[in-house]
Image (cartoon, helix red, strand yellow):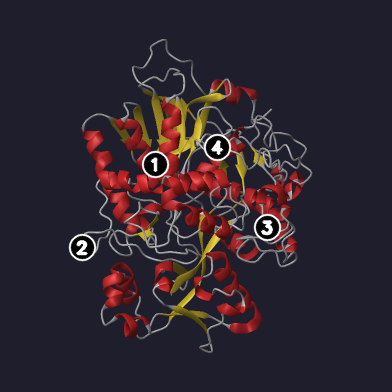
């Protein structure tokens, strides 16, 4: 692939005006919990904030989150015996001890204060008759520490409250919201952030990003909060907006990416067949298993304990793998059995505890008080993403990331249930705090038209040295994502398999084609043959649709990382390398650095 032309990188940002802004300006891309919380925090602190989202403000993964918000509350409010230390231990264990301990400790320590912040913004967490916050238990948590809002609609409860606060600030003129604005490029000047370009709704819907006129928001810093990339796979719990945009934006800007091989599949996604015959997945919360639901195979036998001693309450990667391996061994379809819950908890419990799920299953033709629900794993959450330090700062000066698009290190090889909303809030706040302490540059208040050009081609460059942001002294420290050398070398012994083919072999691809090949070769179960096939096919694909183009790039990045890690750990399972290469225990000394590629964009020269 060719390098971005010097003209592209120097000519795109127009010269800055001599006029200076009164307040530091922050552009936030994405309107899930992380983006909304960051916008509120920055605006309330007096910053000039522009929040961009490519769809409506309420369209995000956060809005669909069912599980809840994990937090160890202060003494007297927490479950007996629970502690921040226990939350840290559970998070590290779920992540196969590959999490960054400093980041995990920070997140868990800030959980209680984050709950207070959300309450102050109007989030109505569920309470008992005595007014105390209710705490639920979810898989791989040692104690009940999950707060819910509206039972099984926690994401919606949190997101709607934050949106209401954003709208209030907008009406007061304290922040600006740009809906249906798809970010197309992070703008750099002299290697630092100068703003973000976007395509208005008409340009995005037409898929004509190469010919439409872009708009620009100039800013002192940009925070990516674009969520995940579930649309990479044919079966996903994610909404249509989850197309890996932030990872693509960051990679093209030269940012370091990390842990992309770790993609979590949720094991209990209800399988529904549409009128056109295609299957789609609808999430059934882990909390249902926490309340006593079990998983059975086609013969009615509970089988998950054959693969993990914790059975249905094992971490998500283990349960998803159990379903995939059991099916591969001839076990047939899997079913979620919630029929015994009401016998223990009383009639009407399912509808009271899970009102949204009760309505969803009934609409699908099931009465889950009596019927078994057909389930299968579905792409749910990307643990990897844009590498950040403890302040949410990336390797590109002025570029921050928070939420699912970021890799803060808290999830390691597998995310612990209900830690995602917590992580997004904690590190969004950290990013804003860090931004507000930095020396101010200039950011003009106006937006202007910028002629669009064809997107430059890129090459993938997996780093292999211990200095590539992954050593025990750097890769797991607070400054992991910010080392100047992190992943920047072009010593890419593995880059050939991920480099795009000559232009003569490129063909146009649809979103569905990309998702089908990723589901086939880079899903729950992987091997070298399938990953090589996926890399070869992805190298021949292109698209005039910017979202599909982002998915193609995200797929190539994920496949390159998965091919490089020749071991099975956490959510990454290789049929040809079923064991873990490095010993369990202290990840900071046991990590096999050479097998952990760090990928960096081509601007790093």
Residue in the foreground of this view, choosing between 501 and 196:
196
The Cα–Cα distance between marks 2 and 3, rounded to whole angstroms, is 55 Å
- Which residue is tagged 4? 389
The Cα–Cα distance between marks 4 and 3, rounded to whole angstroms, is 31 Å
Looking at the image, the residue that sits furthest to the bottom is 299
Q: Disc 2 or disc 4, which is closer to the eye?
A: 2
The Cα–Cα distance between marks 3 and 1, rounded to whole angstroms, is 32 Å
Residue 599 as seen in the image, left or right of residue 180: right
Residue in the foreground of this view, choosing between 212 and 378:
378
Query: Quick one: label 4 or label 3, which is nearer the N terminus?
Result: 4
Task: Pinpoint residue 261: horizontal percent, then vertical percent.
Answer: 63, 54
Q: Disc 4 or disc 1, which is closer to the eye?
A: 4
Any mark on residue 35, and which?
Answer: 1
Q: Residues within 10 Å of mark 2 (few under 14, many from 20)?
A: few
- Which residue is tagged 2? 130
Q: Is residue 550 above or below residue 196?
A: below
- Quadrant location, the N terminus: top right
Query: Quick one: label 3 or label 1, which is nearer the N terminus?
Result: 1
Any mark on residue 534, and which?
Answer: 3
The residue shown at (63%, 83%) is 330
Task: Pinpoint residue 288: horizontal percent, then vertical percent.
Answer: 40, 72
The Cα–Cα distance between marks 1 and 2, rounded to whole angstroms, is 33 Å
Query: Quick one: label 1 or label 2, which is nearer the N terminus?
Result: 1
Q: Disc 2 or disc 3, which is closer to the eye?
A: 2
Task: Pinpoint residue 179: horizontal percent, then vertical percent.
Answer: 34, 40
């Amino acid at each position: 692939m060719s390098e971005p032309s010097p003209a592209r990188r120097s000519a795109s940002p127009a010269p800055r005006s001599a006029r200076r802004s009164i307040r530091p300006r922050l552009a936030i891309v994405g309107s899930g919990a992380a983006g909304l919380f960051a916008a509120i925090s920055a605006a309330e602190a007096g910053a000039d904030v522009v929040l961009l989202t490519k769809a409506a403000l309420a369209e995000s993964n956060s809005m669909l989150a069912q599980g809840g918000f994990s937090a160890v509350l202060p003494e007297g409010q927490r479950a007996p015996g629970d502690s921040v230390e226990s939350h840290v231990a559970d998070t590290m264990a779920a992540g196969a001890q590959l999490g960054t301990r400093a980041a995990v400790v920070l997140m868990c320590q800030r959980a209680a204060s984050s709950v207070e912040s959300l309450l102050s913004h109007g989030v109505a967490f569920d309470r008992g008759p005595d007014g105390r916050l209710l705490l639920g238990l979810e898989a791989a948590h040692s104690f009940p520490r999950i707060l819910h809002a509206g039972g099984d609609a926690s994401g919606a409860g949190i997101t709607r409250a934050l949106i209401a606060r954003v709208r209030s600030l907008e009406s007061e003129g304290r922040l600006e919201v740009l809906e249906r604005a798809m970010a197309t490029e992070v703008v750099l000047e002299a290697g630092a952030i100068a703003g973000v370009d976007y395509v208005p709704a008409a340009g995005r819907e037409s898929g004509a990003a190469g010919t439409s006129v872009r708009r620009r928001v100039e800013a002192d810093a940009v925070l990516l909060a674009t969520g995940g990339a579930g649309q990479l796979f044919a079966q996903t719990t994610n909404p249509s907006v989850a197309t890996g945009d932030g990872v693509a934006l960051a990679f093209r800007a030269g940012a370091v990416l990390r842990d992309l091989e770790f993609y979590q599949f949720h094991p209990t996604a209800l399988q529904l067949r549409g009128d056109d015959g295609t299957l789609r997945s609808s999430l059934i919360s882990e909390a249902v298993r926490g309340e006593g639901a079990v998983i059975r195979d086609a013969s009615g036998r509970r089988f998950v304990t054959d693969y993990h001693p914790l059975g249905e309450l094992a971490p998500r990667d283990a349960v998803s793998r159990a379903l995939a391996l059991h099916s591969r061994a001839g076990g047939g379809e899997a079913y979620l059995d919630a029929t015994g819950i009401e016998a223990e908890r009383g009639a009407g419990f399912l509808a009271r505890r899970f009102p949204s799920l009760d309505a969803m299953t009934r609409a699908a033709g099931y009465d889950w008080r009596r019927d078994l629900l057909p389930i299968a794993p579905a792409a749910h959450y990307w643990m990897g993403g844009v590498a950040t330090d403890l302040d949410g700062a990336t390797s590109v000066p002025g570029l921050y990331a928070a939420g699912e698009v970021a890799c803060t290190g808290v999830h390691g090889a597998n995310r612990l249930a209900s830690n995602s909303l917590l992580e997004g809030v904690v590190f969004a706040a950290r990013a804003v705090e860090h931004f507000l302490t930095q020396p101010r540059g200039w950011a003009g208040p106006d937006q202007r038209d910028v002629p669009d050009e064809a997107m430059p081609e890129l090459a993938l460059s997996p780093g292999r040295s211990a200095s590539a942001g992954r050593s025990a002294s750097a890769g797991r420290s607070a400054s992991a994502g910010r080392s100047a050398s992190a992943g920047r070398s072009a010593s890419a012994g593995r880059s050939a398999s991920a480099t795009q083919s000559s232009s003569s072999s490129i063909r146009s691809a649809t979103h569905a084609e990309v998702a089908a090949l990723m589901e086939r070769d880079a899903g729950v179960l992987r091997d070298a043959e399938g990953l090589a096939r996926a890399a070869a096919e992805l190298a021949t694909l292109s698209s005039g649709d910017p979202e599909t183009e982002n998915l193609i790039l995200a797929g190539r990045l994920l496949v390159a990382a998965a091919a490089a890690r020749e071991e099975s750990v956490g959510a990454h399972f290789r049929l040809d390398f079923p064991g873990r290469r490095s010993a369990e225990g202290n990840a900071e000394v046991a990590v096999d650095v050479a097998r952990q590629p760090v990928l960096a964009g081509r601007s790093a020269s």
